[in-house]
Image: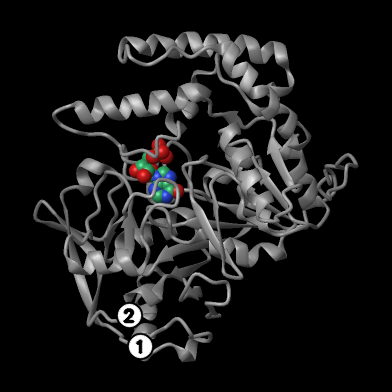
Amino acid sequence: MNQPTHSNHPTDLRTPVSGHAHAVVGLQWGDEGKGKIIDLLAPNYHAVVRYNGGANAGHSVQVAGKRFALHLLPSGILHPGALAVIANGVVVDPFALIKELDALTAQGIDTSGLILSDRAHLVLPYHQTQDALREQLLSDNPTGNAIGTTKRGIGPAYAEKAHRSAAIRAGDLLRPEILRERLQHACRFHNTLHDLDPTAAPHDPNAILDSLHSVTQRLAPHIADTTYLLHQLLRENKNILFEGANATLLDIDHGTFPFVTSSSTTALGIPAGAGVPGKYINDILGIAKAYSTRVGAGPFPTELHDHIGNSIRERGREYGTTTGRPRRCGWLDLVALRYAVMLNAVDAISIMLLDVLSGLPQLKVCTAYEIRGRRTDRFLPDASDLAHATPIYETLPGFSEDLTTARTPDQLPANARAYLDRISDYIGAPIRFVSVGPDRAQTITMQ
Ligand code: IMP
């Protein structure tokens, strides 16, 4: 295997940081098209770094007509020479990671640039069992308050990390004694859940240990201390791109709790999730669709249950990359978007899938909510409050032209430009890119 091309010299921590650290984050409920933009930007960076989430994320990237679906690997893996770093804040299903590596290798992609943090926690089969079981119990409940998770074991793996005693990190794959001991503890704890589902076979630590054997052999050369690595790159004047997974409104602290994922999905998650302080991050690009979508349960004030929602779903191919579930679709919620811009300290945004709105006679954007008779332009990051929000819309004229061949701002119809101007004006951030199709070439640079 080719070793990734970073220097192995010890870092002199007196050297000032001169490399740039930039970030790309999703501003809505996920699936905004971050993968495409990261893929576009990746050639400018020495490393592309995932800092949160796990195989619940689904980034699809289309390169030269070929579509790649990435879940755990940073989108930078598609660029030879760039390091693809999975930092400590990610929860890693090692079996899913191997599957993804194999699929890319079969498509002719060189995956030798992968570096996996020794401190990244592992998602193991008992986490997925627990995820599915909790969701089942919640949906059996008459109040039906299941989260609608991806069942990838994300929540249980982060809970295990918080519990500590039976948590297993990637570095433990290289410490057989510790691995065995922790697996025994973990299986003992998780098998107690069998009282809830007596039909499920108990988890056997020896069987998991056996199955981890070949995984360890494959992953061992990629496991490293990624915190020192990232600091070293920045001191060597090399640039880093952080790739947010999931998205702002799914953030465990700042999203529509409890209908959120289990990690810090915003740029606020980078310092803890990768060990790189916020003061080194000097550009944050937020990604938003020209409309809104959501997968799974939870409030969604601008959701459309009519033919417009269906047409957006079909035209935008709004079906989950990870689970294949149809996504809920609705108008653009500017209240939510401005909140996400504030939280992430976004420098500029990218508007994705603008072409999907072509043909709609009118476009609506939500500029305020009415809640229990009161009007507000603040987002409500709590599901029980947000569930009572009625959107107040502003209506803009639609456009009927096909946008998919536009390559410069002046090739966009006047009504499409007016729609973009209204977004930028409301959220107080400039628009840097507009995407009008899945291919790299279908991207307009606005400024
Ligand atoms: P979990 O992350 O699998 O626990 O799922 C929690 C919620 O986040 C569910 O509503 C999922 O559908 C949603 N979710 C998690 N990751 C993504 C993503 O990358 N895109 C869209 N929704 C996501």
Q: Quadrant of ligand 1?
A: top left
Residue sitting at the far left:
373
Picture coordinates of residue 231, whole percent (x, y): 75, 45
- Specify the amino acid type for callout 1: Glu
Q: Nearer the viewer, residue 346 or 43?
A: 43
Residue drawn where x is 39% and y is 75% of the image:
354
Label 2, secondary structure: give it. Answer: loop
x and y percentages locating residue 340 in the rendered image: 41, 56
Name the kind of residue labelled 2 in the image.
Answer: Ser
Identify the image quadrant of residue 38: bottom right
* Residue 441 drawn at (x, y percent): 57, 77
Q: Is residue 150 above or below residue 266?
A: above
How packed mark 2 is, by other alpha carbons closer than 10 Å (few <14, some 14-19, many 20 or more), is many
Contact between marks 2 and 1 (CB within 8 A): the answer is: yes
Mark 1 lies on residue: 401
Q: Residue at x 27, y 66 (%)?
A: 331
Residue 358 marker: 2
